[in-house]
Image (cartoon, rainbow, N blue to C red):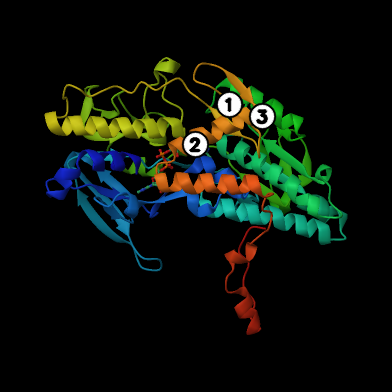
């Protein structure tokens, strides 16, 4: 969306004259701003405010609600599946002159027994809202039950994978739950158990080692049980079995164990590296067989292996900072190439600013590094973190709405009501007929 937005601006007159056409193919009708999902889960931001509708933002573009299934760049054709739910897929063939590939990444799953039945993901707005409701429901369950084992399992929250998604979601939800239990006569914050399981020897692999170490210290200060070099081996029967030999019951299992490049890339004739990302030059053009730019193909974001000058030319790590900066540069380079051919003078290499990273760890708590190497914690880091994301959100309308959510959140105490019934809007009505609904959530 970000690349299309910049192209739309640069080509406005030519789009209106019908000389060029931009088609955006995307199965969702909106962009999801992932870095704020943890705050959606914590109830600090309204879910609708972290998504940006494509058709409203890209009025000059043709937006196709579909999923690309194959790309054949040799003949400059792509195929998309566009179908209403329940209908058989209807393949659409699209011809193009210029291809921009940015399908991002998908969650990396693993064949862990019990994971498919009991695990929750955390990469969509629906999952963020669902997880919030689930956590609040566990507090109700723990308060109501007379079974100590069930109470213990309800108050144990396990997150597997300590990247952005796992760390952000755990920290925000722990903060929210700590506030929520104040309203329960028989649960105290010390009764809650939060476990973060990470297979490698560090957390936040996408961030600098200093920020990661700092975040780890903060989490442990808050009694979060962080297990490094540890894997989840089984979750069958909601009993967590870890590779360090521990075993305990938990009713909340959140799977945030990293991402891999979009599987779509394997169904293309584009050049891929060993991890499955598109091999790119620093100009964001795909690499051709002669090592020079492959004419007409550009890539950005998580799916693109773009050399990072701050990492001795190793590919940029998948994060939002790179994705947005690359999208902007990609659009500028495409505009230059459209004027002067694929190897035009004026195409610029990607030279990112030094990473300016931060992680929110709940209300008023964050860790942040500035691009000059400064280190901040607590409220100052939190303000900086919020300012950065507010600036990066790709819609003025959404920026105002998120800002208003934060202002209102500052004036009133945290909202800790669970609206789990929203996931089953027909349940009350069906109960009136004496029929039950099937609860298909992995609770
Ligand atoms: C929960 C979470 C928290 C995060 N927090 C942070 C953070 O704090 N800071 C940070 O820097 N980064 C963070 N990230 C990472 C960051 O969000 C990603 O690096 C960034 O979104 C990558 O942008 P992208 O455009 O490459 O991919 P995406 O934002 O994933 O967009 C890809 C789009 O392509 C679409 N798509 C996929 N396949 C197809 C197909 N076959 N056809 C058509 N469309 C397709 C998808 O629907 C999606 O809309 C977080 C990620 C998650 C999941």
Q: Which residue is mark 3?
A: 378
Q: Position of residue 182 (x, y in %)?
A: 80, 50
Relative placement, left or right, of 342 versus 29 is: left
Q: Which residue is mark 1?
A: 368
Total of numbered circles in the picture?
A: 3
Query: Which residue does the image show at 84% across and 53% down from the upper left?
Result: 149
Question: Looking at the image, which residue sits at the far top?
Answer: 312
Residue 413, image x and y in percent? Answer: 69, 49
Please report whichever mark, 3 or 2, sits nearer to the chain's N-terminal start: 3
Percent across and percent down for residue 401 are 49, 49
The span from disc 3 to disc 2 (Cα, nearest Å) is: 17 Å
Q: Nearer the viewer, residue 75 or 134?
A: 134
Q: Above or below — where is 340 with respect to 429?
A: above
The local crowd at label 1, few if under 14, some if 14 to 19, many if 20 or more residues have their Cα within 10 Å, is many
For label 2, the residue is 389
- The image quadrant where one finds the C terminus is bottom right
Q: Residue furthest bottom?
A: 433
Disc 2 element: helix
Please name the residue shown 64% across and 62% down the image: 420
User: Residue at left 44%, top 36%?
Assistant: 392
Q: Is residue 177 above or below residue 270?
A: below
**SS category of the residue bearing label 3:** helix
Rate crowding at label 3 as few (under 14), some (14 to 19) or many (20 or more) other CA atoms within 10 Å: some
**Element marked by disc 1:** strand
């Amino acid at each position: 969306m970000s690349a299309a937005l910049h192209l739309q601006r640069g080509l406005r007159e030519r789009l209106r004259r019908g000389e060029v056409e931009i088609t955006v193919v995307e199965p969702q009708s909106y962009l999801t701003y992932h870095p704020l999902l943890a705050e959606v889960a914590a109830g600090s931001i309204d879910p609708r405010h972290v998504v940006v509708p494509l058709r409203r933002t890209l009025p000059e573009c043709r937006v196709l609600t579909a999923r690309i299934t194959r790309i054949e760049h040799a003949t400059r054709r792509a195929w998309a599946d566009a179908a209403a739910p329940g209908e058989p897929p209807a393949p659409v063939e699209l011809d193009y002159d210029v291809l921009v590939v940015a399908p991002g990444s998908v969650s990396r799953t693993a064949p862990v027994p019990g994971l498919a039945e009991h695990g929750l993901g955390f990469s969509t707005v629906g999952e963020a809202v669902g997880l919030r409701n689930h956590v609040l429901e566990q507090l109700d369950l723990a308060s109501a039950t007379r079974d100590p084992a069930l109470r213990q399992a309800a108050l144990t929250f396990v997150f597997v994978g300590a990247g952005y998604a796992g760390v952000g979601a755990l920290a925000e939800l722990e903060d929210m739950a700590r506030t929520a239990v104040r309203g329960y006569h028989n649960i105290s914050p010390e009764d809650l158990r939060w476990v973060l399981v990470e297979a490698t020897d560090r957390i936040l692999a996408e961030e600098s080692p200093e920020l990661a170490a700092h975040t780890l210290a903060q989490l442990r200060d808050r009694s979060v049980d962080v297990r490094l070099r540890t894997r989840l081996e089984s979750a069958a029967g909601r009993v967590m079995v870890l590779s360090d030999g521990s075993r305990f019951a938990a009713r909340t299992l959140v799977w945030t164990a990293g991402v891999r490049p979009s599987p779509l890339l394997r169904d293309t004739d584009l050049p891929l590296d060993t991890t499955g990302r598109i091999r790119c030059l620093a100009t964001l053009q795909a690499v051709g067989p002669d090592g020079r730019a492959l004419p007409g193909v550009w890539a950005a974001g998580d799916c693109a292996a773009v050399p990072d000058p701050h990492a001795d030319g190793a590919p940029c790590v998948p994060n939002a900072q790179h994705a947005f900066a690359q999208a902007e540069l990609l659009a500028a380079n495409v505009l230059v190439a459209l004027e002067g051919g694929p190897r035009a003078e004026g195409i610029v290499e990607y030279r990112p600013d030094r990473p300016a990273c931060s992680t929110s760890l709940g209300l008023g708590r964050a860790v942040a590094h500035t691009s000059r190497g400064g280190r901040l914690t607590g409220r100052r880091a939190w303000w900086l973190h919020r300012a950065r994301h507010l600036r990066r959100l790709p819609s003025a309308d959404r920026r105002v709405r998120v800002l208003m959510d934060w202002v209102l959140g500052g004036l009133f105490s945290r909202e800790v009501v669970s609206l789990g019934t929203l996931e089953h809007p027909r349940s009350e009505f069906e109960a009136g007929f004496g029929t039950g609904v099937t609860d298909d959530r992995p609770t």
